[in-house]
Amino acid sequence: MSGHVMVSFKRRVWVPIATAVAVVAATAAPATAAQGGLLDRALAAVHAAGMPGVYAEVRDGRRTWQGASGVADTATGRPVRPDFEHRAGSTTKTFVATGVLQQVAAGRIDLDAPIARYLPGLVKDERGRKVTVRMLLNHTSRIADYVSIGGLWATTDDIYRTRLTSYAPERLAEIGLNLPPLPGEPGSEHSYSNTNYAILGLLLAKVTGQPVRDYLTRNVIRAAGIGRTTYFPGNDPVIRGPHSRAYDSMYGTWNPPKDFSVTNMSWAGTAGEIVSTVDDLNRFYRALLQGRLLPPALLAEMKKPGTADTTYGLGIFSLPIPGCGTFWGHDGGAFGMGTYAFSTEDGTRQIAIGINMHKYQQIGPDGQIQQHAIDRAIGGLIRAGLCPSSPATELPLDGVRG
């Protein structure tokens, strides 16, 4: 494979929402048998559509439902559990953006300052003077994504071959900065790039004077009350607690799918390294959206889209569901694992979902990723958790990005 072909999925996917679920889940503590049954069926539909294993949590105020369907290991049949630790991919970006905005609140970072003010030796060309911290956070920098074929990896085979390799964050940023920049001036258009968050991790380390993982653990993870089962693994390739295997088919390239259960996530770093649980993700987004991690003005800033062509703000994006409301959160992908986490704006109603196979779709003749029955089933599960009584429609979800 030649050129800079993205292995992370950035196209917008239109996921039809299933109509079979008709009442709000998690309306009792615990949910009533009927309500829990509806969510159980929506969860089972994801497994029936072809996902080996899926686990989820729905929270509504103090009421909680958890469920799991399918297997954690296709060879042994070991079942999945809702308390599994899980590589949560690009949900990491919300944690990192929260840390950056905390430093904005402290006066150490100016959102609209050029990145060269803080990292002059890293971004040496004119982009250092034009790209601001805000542009990195909202992906309008026009800096290319290091997660690509031709960037971090030469071929798709390299991805699996180097799964235990350790990468320094400086190297990840350097790879992205050395790729040809995207057309257009910085700030002109949204284009998702993991390089932005590699740079932001270096920025946080510079202004705080401490390792970025340490800073985020103390000031974001523990501040949200989730320090035990949410963590940055660094170069450790093994998930510490109970977890599923992680299967990836690279859009049909790997058949059977490859097992990425043991993987060094330093390739993702502050763009996507974090390990969490569905319960912890809901707790984190609730703490964030209810104002426990940021001042109100900066939380409002976080929700402002970078450009008119996106709903992406500063490390978080909105998901409008017609007839139901607008939800906030992020999705994520690590090789073999995918994540969705969305909440109402006040953080009271939430869903977080983990899946243990990634890039299960196929590439069509037009080069676009084709919708899979799993996508429709995930849409149904999201509807079951967030707004089952709203009219059936198509649910716009940004694809799992990695």
Image (cartoon, rainbow, N blue to C red):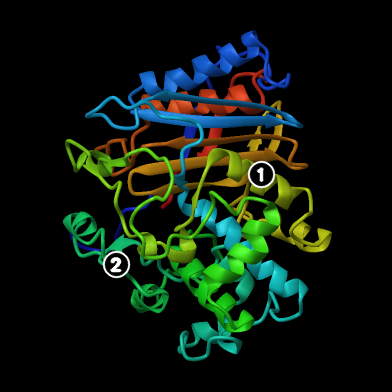
The residue depicted at 54 percent of the width and 63 percent of the height is 139
The residue depicted at 37 percent of the width and 75 percent of the height is 168
User: Spatial distance from mark 1 to mark 2, Cα to Cα?
Assistant: 33 Å
Q: Which residue is mark 1?
A: 283
Residue furthest to the top in view is: 34
**Image quadrant in which you'd find residue 227:** bottom right
Q: Amino acid at mark 1?
A: Arg
Q: Secondary structure at mark 1?
A: helix
Q: Nearer the viewer, residue 82 or 364?
A: 82
Left or right of 361 on screen, residue 270: right
Q: Crowding near pointer 1: few (<14 within 10 Å), some, many (20+)?
A: some
The vertical placement of 382 against 281, above or below, is: above
The vertical placement of 389 against 124, above or below, is: above
The vertical placement of 46 against 151, above or below, is: above
Residue 340: give x, y in percent of width and height.
52, 40
Residue 264: give x, y in percent of width and height.
33, 60
Q: In terms of sequence position, does the residue under pointer 1 or pointer 2 come before the other? A: 2
Q: Secondary structure at mark 2?
A: loop
Query: Quadrant where the N terminus lies?
Result: bottom left
The residue depicted at 33 percent of the width and 28 percent of the height is 52
- Using the image, tell me which numbered label, if any, was put on residue 152: 2
The mark tally for this picture is 2
Residue 282: give x, y in percent of width and height.
63, 41
**Image quadrant in which you'd find residue 23:** top right
Q: Amino acid at mark 2?
A: Leu
Whether residue 313 is visible here, answered yes or no, is yes
